[in-house]
């Protein structure tokens, strides 16, 4: 997602940062506010020779630790504010300046080493608070409404296979109606979904849900990543990994899989953005235990944060 020598702006916990990657793969991150006259550094450009970012307003130059470079000399102290990153294989993590409370998960690296990466999809900012956006990923009853036309689910039974702190594995048995040949032609991946799906999900609270679709033709590991941009905005994207039973299927299904993932997120986002303010539920559905587990983790995590 991070191109070479191209500044990339991210928003996390109400703060804007700029990230960039040098040709040799070194990744740097600074607070996006230039300490001179507060221009957004992400609108600037990268000096490849020094691996510095240059402010778009007066062309002042900073390295990844925030030091200023002027007349071939570095400032002794950082003037721009660096953001601490943890690089783990292809993944860039950060605690956003907070004291770490949870470890960096190793599941992502494991999936990346075992499956083929098909691409990033469904990148968007959802106008919804983090908890609501998180809970829809743990909500095993919403496919009957939110995704009814796409998945044609008749019934779902989800159960915990494993629950260990922030890690959980859930099995999902879902029965669905058949797709018409027109629907499959428009979206070839639908043809790979069996009538009774035996899927499972691996969760690492709070950032990640891997949805694993098991079919004889393809096994996907669809990583839904979430983080709070602001109090009312949640960023999401999907890292799609898969294993195909033969390589021909990959060329037929790759685009369709990426497209399907993006439709699902679009449907979730439309739903989240339409909700009225949360109240205590007066009705309960069969698979909500999984959602309450996430809500509980959120409450404990939130209370233990040092703000
Ligand atoms: S505002 Fe950045 S150099 Fe002036
Ligand atoms: Fe959904």
Image (tube, helix red, strand yellow):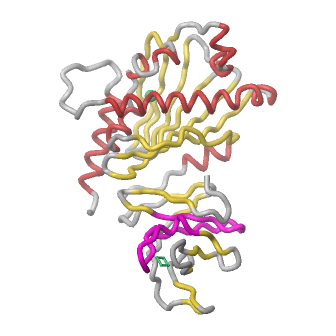
Residue 206 lies in the magenta stretch = no
* Relative depth, front residue between 141 and 57: 57
Q: Which residues are magenta?
A: 17-44
Q: Which quadrant of the view contains residue 259?
A: top right
- In which quadrant will I find the C terminus? bottom left
Ligand 2 shown in quarter: top left
Give above or below for 303 relative to 281. below
Where residue 83 sits in the image (x, y, percent)? 46, 69
Where residue 3 sits in the image (x, y, percent)? 65, 58
Residue 22 lies in the magenta stretch = yes
* Relative depth, front residue between 126 and 65: 126
Q: Residue at x 70, y 78 (%)?
A: 49
Where residue 264 sits in the image (x, y, percent)? 50, 28
**Residue 111 in view in this figure:** yes
**Residue 62 in view in this figure:** no
* Relative depth, front residue between 179 and 88: 179
Q: Which quadrant of the view contains residue 89?
A: bottom right
Give above or below for 246 relative to 46. above
How many numbered dots are placed on residues in this image?
0
Where residue 86 sits in the image (x, y, percent)? 52, 63
Give above or below for 58 relative to 284. below
* Relative depth, front residue between 226 and 266: 266
Q: Residue at x 61, y 38 (%)?
A: 240
Position of 258 compared to 160: left or right?
Answer: right
Give above or below for 222 relative to 231. above
Q: Which quadrant of the view contains residue 13?
A: bottom left
Q: Residue at x 37, y 46 (%)?
A: 233
Position of 141 compared to 55: left or right?
Answer: left
């Amino acid at each position: 997602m991070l191109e070479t020598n191209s500044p990339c702006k991210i928003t996390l916990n109400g703060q804007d940062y700029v990230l960039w990657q040098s040709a040799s793969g070194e990744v740097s991150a600074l607070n996006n506010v230039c300490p001179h006259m507060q221009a957004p550094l992400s609108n600037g450009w990268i000096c490849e020779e020094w691996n510095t970012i240059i402010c778009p307003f007066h062309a002042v130059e900073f390295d990844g630790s925030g030091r200023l470079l002027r007349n071939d000399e570095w400032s002794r102290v950082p003037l721009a504010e660096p953001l601490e990153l943890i690089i783990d294989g292809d993944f860039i993590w950060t605690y956003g300046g907070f004291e770490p409370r949870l470890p960096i998960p190793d599941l992502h690296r494991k999936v990346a080493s075992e499956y083929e990466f098909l691409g990033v999809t469904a990148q968007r900012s959802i106008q919804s608070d983090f908890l609501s956006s998180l809970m829809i990923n743990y909500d095993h009853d919403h496919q009957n409404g939110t995704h009814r036309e796409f998945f044609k689910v008749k019934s779902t039974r989800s159960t915990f296979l494993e629950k260990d702190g922030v890690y959980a594995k859930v099995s999902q048995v879902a029965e669905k109606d058949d797709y018409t040949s027109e629907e499959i032609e428009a979206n070839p991946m639908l043809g790979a979904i069996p009538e009774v799906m035996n899927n499972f999900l691996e969760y690492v609270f709070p950032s990640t849900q891997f949805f694993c679709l098991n079919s004889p033709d393809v096994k996907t590991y669809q990583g839904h990543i979430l983080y709070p941009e602001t109090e009312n905005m949640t960023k999401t994207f999907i890292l799609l990994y898969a294993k195909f039973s033969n390589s021909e299927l990959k060329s037929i299904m790759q685009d369709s899989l990426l497209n399907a993932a993006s439709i699902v997120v679009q449907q979730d986002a439309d739903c989240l953005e339409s909700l009225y303010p949360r109240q205590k539920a007066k009705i309960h559905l069969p698979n909500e235990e999984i959602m309450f587990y996430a809500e509980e983790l959120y409450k404990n995590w939130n209370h233990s944060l040092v703000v």
